[in-house]
Amino acid sequence: MIQTQEFLTKVLDSVPDQLVVIDALGDIQFANKSWHVFGDENASTLSGDWDGVNYLSECDKASDMGDEIGTRAGQGIRSVIEAQNHEFYLEYPCHSPDVKRWFMMRVNSFDYDDRLYFVISHQDITERKLTEEKVEDLARLDGLTGIANRRYFEEFLHQEWRRCARLKKPICLAIIDIDNFKMLNDTYGHQSGDDCLISFGELLTQYARRPGDLCARYGGEEFILLWADTSLKTAKRLVNRLMRDISGLDIPNPNSPTATHVTASIGLTEMTPRPGTSHTDIVSIADDALYRAKEGGRNQIYCQTNRDIEGQAS
Ligand SMILES: Nc1nc2c(ncn2[C@@H]2O[C@H](COP(=O)(O)OP(=O)(O)OP(=O)(O)O)[C@@H](O)[C@H]2O)c(=O)[nH]1
């Protein structure tokens, strides 16, 4: 069996993972070739001549600059050095402005000559992460329109509801339902119906530009616009503009009893999350408002808040 140092170094240099060995103080004792190549490509402070470099100090420096990965890496390595954990691993993003990349860091220990050493390896897991991202996108997007689906909307609403509860800010929700859509399908066929839904998806995307906004397909010909931390006054302005834009799409629906082009009815509401209220309430109120818009003759906005409902009840 070949076991010369030169042979073993060549073995370690041929491994694509970046490997570095530190002692219990964090001082680097060894780094393989991939380590240097990666460091050089990324202008890392840990690249080049590693002699005299302390890995833990580098993590602490990154942590002091607000790098959360540096904090977690430092804590994880120390937990193995202090024998609180047998091993540690961390998946972390390392994106450049042009390329998305992720790595998995692993820390394991071994003893040699009565001293403990720690192998820190970094493996490129970009391909797996990109596949996971694609799967996540597929699970949260509507297949026809490419906007968020109902499942994702519910997750998003829950998250924004909690955020607005903390901030004591209002959330506005609009449910948009295409009028006499069945007539469009019956007149021009299912493909034209699909094209109309795609146009609605594209239009609604323009109304959800901030991180707390979302447009989603809620069901067949029903869509949602959610605006977190937004007043009813702003939301009213937005839905009024949306009604004009829908009319501007000018999609023919000649047999519709409402108009000769495609129109929509909108139920709009605003709620500020308070104890005793839930994120499902805002959907129920908007849904009720939509029902009233349909009952009122379609092609209109009906706005209703929980204050109106409380007012009616008293
Ligand atoms: N082309 C197409 N049609 C769909 C899709 N999803 C649902 N639909 C159709 O949408 C129609 C909805 O009909 P209704 O619920 O009666 O609503 P409507 O005709 O818009 O009437 P109102 O909403 O009351 O104005 C049904 O005919 C569904 O088959 C879809 O993905 N593509």
Image (tube, grey):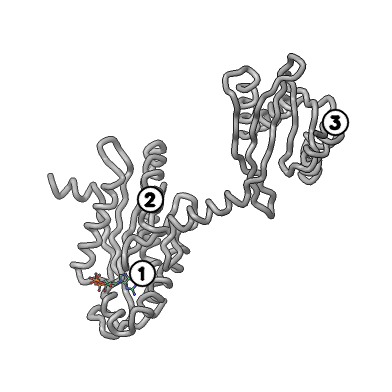
Of callouts 3 and 2, which one flags the residue occurring earlier in the amino acid sequence? 3
Determine which residue is flagged by label 3.
5
Element type at marker 2?
loop
Determine which residue is flagged by label 2.
231
Of callouts 3 and 1, which one flags the residue occurring earlier in the amino acid sequence? 3
Quarter where residue 222 is shown: bottom left
Q: Residue at x 49, y 57 (%)?
A: 209
User: Residue 135: which numbered mark, if any?
Assistant: none
Q: Residue at x 28, y 35 (%)?
A: 275
Disc 2 crowd rating (10 Å Cα; few below 14, some 14-19, many 20+) is some
Q: Position of residue 10 (x, y in %)?
A: 83, 39
Q: Position of residue 42 (x, y in %)?
A: 76, 44
Seen as rendered, the residue at the extreme top is 114
Disc 1 crowd rating (10 Å Cα; few below 14, some 14-19, many 20+) is some
Q: Residue at x 35, y 50 (%)?
A: 154
Query: Is 36 left, or right, of 144 in this rendering?
Result: right
Name the amino acid, label 1: Met
Name the amino acid, label 3: Gln
Query: Is 36 left, or right, of 121 in this rendering?
Result: right
Work out how far the residue at label 3 is from the one at label 2, CA to CA, in angstroms.
Answer: 70 Å
Determine which residue is flagged by label 1.
243
